[in-house]
Amino acid sequence: EAGVAQSPRYKIIEKRQSVAFWCNPISGHATLYWYQQILGQGPKLLIQFQNNGVVDDSQLPKDRFSAERLKGVDSTLKIQPAKLEDSAVYLCASSSGPILYEQYFGPGTRLTVT
Amino acid sequence: QKEVEQNSGPLSVPEGAIASLNCTYSDRGSQSFFWYRQYSGKSPELIMFIYSNGDKEDGRFTAQLNKASQYVSLLIRDSQPSDSATYLCAVNRGQGAQKLVFGQGTRLTINP
């Protein structure tokens, strides 16, 4: 079974530029998550999709971040414009079910904003 | 007060000893609790979850939950150098869907 795929793996941009990340979850997984992990901290949930609908985006900075899940499969996360404090690893995870089902994480995208 | 608190470490344990990792949480309504392991530069991977008070064992790992004290722990028996990693405690705050809140993680080093 293929795992969660993410691209790019690394990205360096200047502040005020825009950037987009892509995630392809495990086939058949209805739930998709985007997390932000700043160095030395645990992952913080940004947005959660169930199929192509948003379940929770309470911690997504909506003035600069946006996300969508196309046809309930792939997802993109965009930052526009980027700030220095957005430097982090952006992790995508997927799950086949609720509550006690395991979340499988992708390799992440390391973003550096200069 | 953070929702999920862990000692950031580093915690240093000799090989073959028991490593004890602790986590406290603030939301009394939390129902399920997860331990993830994260190697440096890698993504988190699930070790185990627990949702009932008491102990749950899986191989060399034991998770312990005390809801009255809002405390969850992970014991690693016969620690190996390959156990050296950051261990993340996560609490599910979701109702009907999993919404994990992670602690900052405890960095564990097993010394040969």
Image: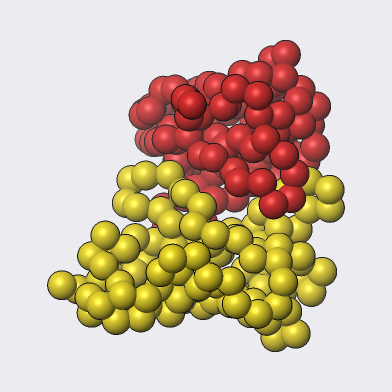
Question: In front: B89, or A11?
Answer: B89
Q: Position of residue B98 (x, y in %)?
A: 73, 48
Above or below, A91 against B16 in this view is: above
Q: Position of residue A9 (x, y in %)?
A: 38, 28
Q: Colour mode?
A: by chain
In this rendered view, identify the residue nearer to me: B93 or A80.
Answer: B93
Across and down, in percent, residue B101 comes to 65, 57
Can residue B46 be seen here? yes
From the viewer's perspective, is A102 left or right of B62? right
Which residue appears at 75% of the width and 44% of the height?
A: A98
Residue A75, above or below B40: above
The quarter of the displayed image where residue B82 is located: bottom left
Q: Is residue B5 visible?
A: no
Toward the bottom, the furthest residue is B69
How many marks do you count on the picture? Answer: 0
How far across and down, in percent of the image, does residue A77 sit?
60, 26
Residue under the point 45% across and 41% down: A89
Residue occupying the point 67% across, 73% down: B25
Work out which residue is located at the far top of the displayed protein and give it: A71
Q: Is residue B49 left or right of residue A71?
A: left
Judge left or right: residue B56 versus residue A15: right
Instruction: Quarter of the image for the C terminus of chain A: give it.
Output: top left
Chain A painted colour: red
The answer to whether B80 is drawn above or below residue A51 in the figure is below
- Display colour for chain B: yellow
- Residue drawn at the location 25% of the way across and 77% of the way down: B16
